[in-house]
Amino acid sequence: MNKQVKIFDTTLRDGEQSPGCSMNLKEKIEVAKCLERLKVDVIEAGFAISSPGDFESVKTIAETVKDCTVASLARAAVKDLDAAWEAVKGAVDPRIHLFIATSPLHMQYKLRMTEEQVLEKTAAMVAYASKYCSNIEFSCEDATRSDPDFLVKVCNLAVAGGAKVLNIPDTVGYTTPAEMQALIEYLMARVDRADEIEFSVHCHNDLGMAVANSLGGVLGGARQIECTINGLGERAGNTSLEEVVMAMRTRPDIYQVETRIDTTQIWRASKTVYNIIGQSAPLNKPIVGKNAFAHESGIHQHGVLANKLTYEILTPEAVGIQTNNIVLGKHSGKHAFESHLAEMGYHLEADELLRCFDEFKVLCDKKKTVSDADIEAIILHKKTRDDDVEIEGGFELDWFAVHTSNFTTATCTVSLKRGEEKFENVSLGDGPIDAAFKAIDGIVNPPACTFDIYNIHSISEGKDTLGDVTIRIASGGKTYVGRGLSTDIIEASIKAYIIAINKLMATQ
Ligand code: KIV
Ligand code: ZN
């Protein structure tokens, strides 16, 4: 029987705090639900003290999630620990995750503390946190650049104070797999009651080695991996959940461990997170990139046709990629649609189902064949979009008309709805999309903003494919993402822009 490695997901904390990845409350709840379906062991829902918004989202997630431990990060400080506990205490299994830096550089320049002071603080704050809760995780920030013997001292105090999990972060992505393995072995051999403690690794990806370093930690005896969906996180990101989980699953002969992750939920979780932050996977991203399972070269195709194992070490089905295409069409009824969604792993509330079915029918009129990828796009867009459209006082597209050619200036007339009110405007522009956005600006009158991202990608093959448009605008140091889906890319762009603008206006 292989040993169990716990998966601690920090998409909503380390991932969310990185630039361009911020999420609103509803989006965070959507991600938390994905993580619960994935069966991660721990969800780090945020850093409760960092803002009222973070506090609220940690609290809501703690009260919503039933099948995972929910943690809040806290510095080793009384007010942080108070806020962390207030936020997570409603969880089925709450955890406080506190940290203090232990490397000479961090202690001297960031904390301005001596080793003695760090030791004292550790003992006092772990004991303080333990009064609230028995599930305490303690992290030595910048552990891989710390003196290993000092780490032993800090860890011993944390264990004495009641910590049950000792996390060893490679905060700046500096270590190597062999070094991480050796460090975990070193600590496990010296820290008091090491056999009762869960050792954990938290690796950043600055040198592209976060996954390899986490696996090094597992070989050294770590039994918890901290990671994020799609490897989101500070700078070059964290260990990617999908990569590290599939590596352990594909090579049990090497790692001799297992996780409780339902890998068939990986694809959906990855898509949901990319959708929310307005990014998409690089084509060659392991596990979730478009090309991860594509065999283009003749030699590879020949091999795969003869025997899949020639070039395929894991299957798309194992990570939940839909490969059985085109079963539904114009004449399919709601029940067929619903049972097909269930086969794809989607169980929608009655009203969501109805709205997705309506969109599916509209699409059937526009497209000859509707693929599973199209259906999945409708569902994921619906889930992340409805809330945005419903922003109080938000605008919705009523209709638009464009005129464009290669010898005249483009014009767009747009009609927007807000409740019962309708607003019309017309504008010229440098192309139909610019004209449309200017017409919208004329109605909404948003504050100055810049375009960070404007992406169009096709959901499936064929000229009639659905266009998936992502727009990210920035204003006042914050970013706002909108996505639109349509077989008409101007319509998709207009819808995406309206959502981004609604989000921006909601903060004014
Ligand atoms: O990278 C890091 O050191 C962290 C800790 C706060 C766990 O994110
Ligand atoms: Zn980190």
Image: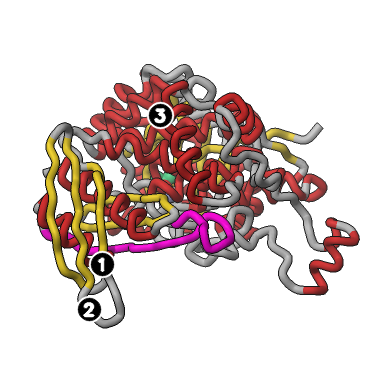
Please tell me which residue lies in front, 153 or 398: 398
Compared across the picture, whether 506 is left or right of 63 comes to: left
The residue at which mark 3 appears reads as 96
Mark 1: C-beta under 8 Å from nearest atom of ligand 2: no
Q: Range of the magenta residues?
A: 448-467
Label 1 Cα crowd, 10 Å radius (few <14 / some 14-19 / many 20+): some
Which color scheme did the rendering employ for the protein?
secondary structure
Q: How many marks?
A: 3
Q: Is residue 288 magenta?
A: no
Residue at point 32%, 31% (across, down): 57
Please tell me which residue lies in front, 65 or 339: 339
First along the sequence among labels 2 and 1: 1
The residue at which mark 1 appears reads as 403
Residue 167 is labelled as none
Q: Is residue 370 visible?
A: yes
Please tell me which residue lies in front, 477 or 9: 477
Residue at point 31%, 52% (across, down): 496
Q: CA distance from mark 2 to mark 1?
A: 9 Å
Q: CA distance from mark 3 to mark 1?
A: 58 Å
Residue 257 on image: x %, y %: 73, 40
Please say if the residues under marks 2 and 1 sit with CB atoms less than 8 Å apart. yes
The residue at which mark 2 appears reads as 408
Q: Could you say whether the residue bearing mark 2 is in a helix, strand or loop?
A: loop
Label 3 Cα crowd, 10 Å radius (few <14 / some 14-19 / many 20+): many
